[in-house]
Image: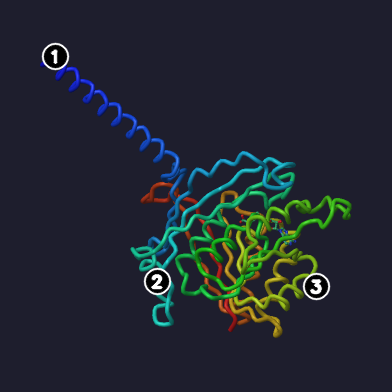
Amino acid sequence: MLCLQQTLNLRLFAAIVNLWLCLSLLVESFSTTFSSRPTVATYFLVDKASKQLLGSCYQLEPLLLETAEDEVDEYYPTSRKAYVFDQPKPTTKNNASSNAANQTANNSSNKREISVRRTSFGCSKLGYTVWPASLVLSLDMVARTGDYEGKRILELGAGVGLPSVVAGKVVGASAILATDHWLNDDAEAFDDKRLIPTPYHEMNLRFNVQSENSSIRNVDWHDIESVRAACTDFSPDVVIGSDLIYYPSDLPFLCRTLEHFLLDPSSSCREILLVSPLPEPIREALPQFQEWLEQKALDKMFQLDTNTLVLHENKIEEAEGGEHFLKVTMKRQ
Ligand SMILES: C[S@@+](CC[C@H](N)C(=O)[O-])C[C@H]1O[C@@H](n2cnc3c(N)ncnc32)[C@H](O)[C@@H]1O
């Protein structure tokens, strides 16, 4: 009798152990499948002069996809980049100008995951990837959400369009137009002096940006009619752009485009916000662009603000670490 009792107790014990093992395996597989994916890097944006932390975001391991989503995936090497930004609380008129430090410290913000698809140089030329300046522009807009929330935002030279996506999904802009220049079809005349993306670049930008309040458009700074038409049809409040100051041969056309948005009486644009990397050696067209800016500001054509922002990866270094960027804000007088 005692022996039978011991056997039953042992069986019960074994069953409980088995159940516990199964449950813990289930919990483990559930958490690896559904919990947060590994973090690739965390980025911190700091104002160089004041040393104030303006904002941060982190990059996640992207979700793996097994099938091609369209022809861009079929014809070109592609990959996804996923970032998590804090979505600040909606602002009211009274706290719309609350500063970046307050936004960063705001505990009631929601995390928003943004994902964009990168292509290859063969598909999109220089607009094929997320350049660090576009992350800086995105973080700067999020830090000053109050200034951009509810605004109509037009992005120039959008590439894969990260700032446009962030403007729509994190900052709460009311309408977004992401512009870039691409060939309309493969047969279009090929200019071997310019790096112009293929027609599939349009498909990629649309894939990343298009939503209820966001669209895309082919705008070539060399073609002032395309600039005028986008300005008239979309009526932007703010124009943004990252890493646009590249080749001296494009600069006069880019400056003419900026002048149209900010100075033409028919334009509704009140502000242009640009972010440019300050690498060593410096971008070839940047000194000439800075001269143009200073002259226009001297002539009181617009109000000019410039400052240096620093992007740190994973840790904020005390001294000279991090990548440096020039932020330019031009406001209508
Ligand atoms: C270095 S990429 C920067 C892309 C994106 N803004 C970023 O920071 O990730 C320069 C972008 O400017 C665009 N671009 C160059 N010349 C242009 C032109 N004449 N008209 C319109 N876009 C142009 C390119 O197609 C490319 O997308």
- Residue 102's place in the image compared with 34, above or below, is below
Q: Is residue 130 visible?
A: yes
Coordinates of residue 84 in the picture (x, y in percent): 47, 54
- Residue at (56%, 41%) from the top-left corner? 64
- Residue at (45%, 48%) from the top-left corner? 313
Q: In the image shown, does 118 or 299 lie closer to the viewer? A: 118
Q: Amino acid at mark 1?
A: Cys
Q: Could you give the CA–CA distance between mark 1 and mark 3, rounded to whole angstroms? A: 96 Å
Image quarter of the N terminus = top left
The numbered mark, 3 or 2, whose residue comes first in the sequence reads: 2
Quarter residue 173 falls in: bottom right
Residue under pointer 2: 99
Q: Could you give the CA–CA distance between mark 3 and mark 2, rounded to whole angstroms? A: 38 Å
Query: Which of pointers 1 and 2 indicates the residue nearer the eye?
Result: 1
Circle number at residue 225: 3
Tell me if 140 is positioned left or right of 157 in this view: left
Tell me if 156 is positioned left or right of 135 in this view: right
Image quarter of the C terminus = bottom right
Coordinates of residue 191 in the picture (x, y in percent): 84, 53
